[in-house]
């Protein structure tokens, strides 16, 4: 049974016991009635357990919210850092007149981007440029994780 159904069942028992006590002892005072019901039902303990559980959930929520915010900030910093590194590599390769360079994990190339602009293309390791024809540089892999271009601002 879930928590809601369990509390609902215990609430029904509590109401029934309350009605029976009031019928049998019509002159019972409120404090005695409450103490008696607390002793013969588990409703008070269940309510306390639900409240404790809610407090735990709220604490976890707050902790995760903070962690998520920290991770988003970190992701932004990493993205900016990667962009700056690509721009630096593009600038250096462009000024040195370097075209295609093999790096661990693949290769990089400086290609025209139209309107007098150039961009840096990172190609995956599967492309073997030692044996590929020069036109290979103009083709983009069909892989969605293929080349990623960075154009300087």
Image: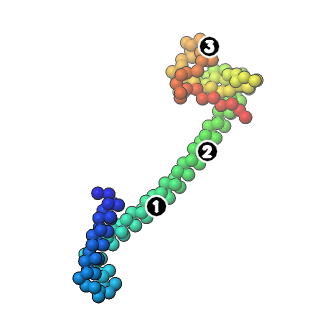
Q: Residue at x 55, y 26 (%)?
A: 146
Q: Is residue 94 above or below residue 45?
A: above
Q: Is residue 27 above or below residue 125?
A: below
Residue at disc 2, secondary structure? helix
Q: Position of residue 153 (x, y in %)?
A: 73, 34
Q: Is residue 62 above or below residue 23?
A: above
**Label 2 Cα crowd, 10 Å radius (few <14 / some 14-19 / many 20+):** few
Q: Residue at x 35, y 66 (%)?
A: 49
Numbered disc total: 3
Q: Which residue is mark 2?
A: 77
In the image, which is nearer the foreground, mark 1 or mark 3?
1
Horizontal side of 84 relative to 61 (left or right) equals: right
Foreground residue among 63 and 10 = 10
Horizontal side of 68 relative to 117 (left or right) equals: left
Q: Position of residue 14 (x, y in %)?
A: 29, 72
Q: Which residue is mark 1?
A: 58
> Toward which corner of the image does residue 42 lie, by quadrant?
bottom left
Horizontal side of 48 relative to 71 (left or right) equals: left
The disc placed on residue 97 is: none
CA gap, disc 2 and disc 1: 29 Å
Q: Residue at x 33, y 72 (%)?
A: 44
- Nearest to N terminus: mark 2 or mark 1: 1
Foreground residue among 150 and 12 = 12
> Toward which corner of the image does residue 53 lie, by quadrant?
bottom left
**Label 3 Cα crowd, 10 Å radius (few <14 / some 14-19 / many 20+):** few
Foreground residue among 46 and 141 = 46
Residue at disc 1, secondary structure? helix
Q: Residue at x 52, y 24 (%)?
A: 143
Q: Which residue is mark 3?
A: 135
- Nearest to N terminus: mark 3 or mark 2: 2
Foreground residue among 108 and 30 = 30
Residue at disc 3, secondary structure? helix
């Amino acid at each position: 049974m879930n928590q809601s159904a369990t509390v609902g069942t215990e609430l029904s028992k509590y109401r029934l016991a309350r009605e029976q006590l009031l019928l049998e002892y019509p002159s019972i005072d409120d404090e005695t009635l409450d103490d008696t019901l607390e002793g013969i039902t588990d409703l008070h303990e269940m309510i306390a357990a639900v409240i404790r559980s809610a407090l735990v959930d709220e604490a976890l929520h707050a902790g995760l919210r903070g962690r998520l915010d920290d991770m988003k900030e970190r992701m932004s910093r990493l993205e900016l850092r990667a962009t700056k590194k690509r721009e630096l590599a593009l600038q250096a390769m462009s000024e040195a007149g370097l075209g295609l360079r093999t790096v661990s994990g693949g290769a990089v190339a400086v290609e025209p981007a139209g309107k007098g602009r150039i961009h840096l293309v990172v190609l995956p390791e599967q492309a073997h440029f030692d044996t590929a024809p020069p036109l290979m540089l103009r083709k983009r892999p069909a892989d969605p994780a293929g080349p990623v271009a960075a154009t300087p601002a």
